[in-house]
Amino acid sequence: MPQIPTSPPAGAIAADAVLVVGAGRLGTALVAALTDAGVDVRGPAGRGASGEDAAVVLLAVPDAAIAEAAALIAPGRLVGHLSGATTLAPLSPHAAFSIHPLITVTARTRSFTGVPAALAGSSAAALRTAQTLAAALGMAPFEVADADRTAYHAAASLASNLVVALESVAEALAGTAGVDRAALVPLARAAIDDWAVLGARAALTGPVVRGDEPTVQAQRAAVAERLPARLALFDELVSAARDLAGAAPPSDARSGEEPT
């Protein structure tokens, strides 16, 4: 069983026990995954648990409930949360850490193997605990300082939630031409896959990177006519693409080859 580094009061609690507070999808999935990893895990317990039978308490509760749940934890426990945007401040005065899995958890999630995870700790010992738990779960951890949490979380939203919002705009525009979502899916997947492997500059294709300004302006006119409320969004994205294309080497082999 992985040993969780803690410094509890002598004889007060089970030295390696981890209590998960929060019986939602994330809490339930973590208990299952930690159990599979051989960790002495209890729960998921409901909000209001004191954690008296554990050395480490992991709060799988909504961001707004973290401070209240932490205040109910008995002194001497090492307390962590799973929020991406929240700093360690709501866990005070406990020794604190955080683990934020960069994954969408569903009712079927049981494994966190290979999942990137942002870690933070209020001390070296607290950070080691986060690292130990992440290792037990098979995660790919990295550290994010409290001062960078909001920017990190905004980046995560851009890469996931807001990509979905953008795809919904593309779907709506395609719908005005009688084209359904399924036709766009291979294109969207290829763009993400290329970005993941090649990076943004090499993955960028289309009229902007080719310098085909008449096509860009024709597209803009179509958006203005059919989805006028999204014209400002289109303009901002084209501007970002122009910036990216301007930074790309002129000899980029991808330029001029793709029809999209």
Image (cartoon, helix red, strand yellow):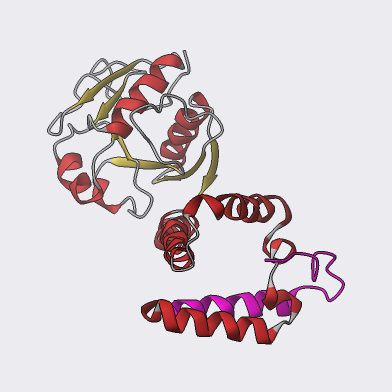
Classify 126 as above or below 259: above
Q: Residue furthest front?
A: 178
Q: Is residue 233 magenta?
A: yes
Position in image of residue 147 (x %, y %): 42, 62
Position of residue 177 in the picture relative to residue 39 (left or right): right
Residue at the (59%, 84%) spot, across then down? 218
Q: Is residue 82 visible?
A: yes
Position in image of residue 23 (x %, y %): 22, 29
Classify 216 as above or below 21: below
**Quadrant in the picture for residue 72:** top left
Residue at the (44%, 56%) spot, across then down? 164
Position in image of residue 244 (x %, y %): 67, 74
Position of residue 128 in the picture relative to residue 106 (left or right): right
**The C terminus lies in quadrant:** bottom right
Residue at the (67%, 63%) spot, across then down? 200
Position of residue 138 in the picture relative to residue 175 (left or right): right
Q: How many marks?
A: 0
Q: Is residue 232 visible?
A: no
Position in image of residue 154 (x %, y %): 42, 61
**Quadrant in the picture for residue 247:** bottom right
Position of residue 57 in the picture relative to residue 147 (left or right): left
Q: Is residue 223 magenta?
A: no
Magenta region: 231-260
Q: Relative to the observer, which residue lies in front, 254 or 129? A: 254
Residue at the (54%, 45%) spot, across then down? 142
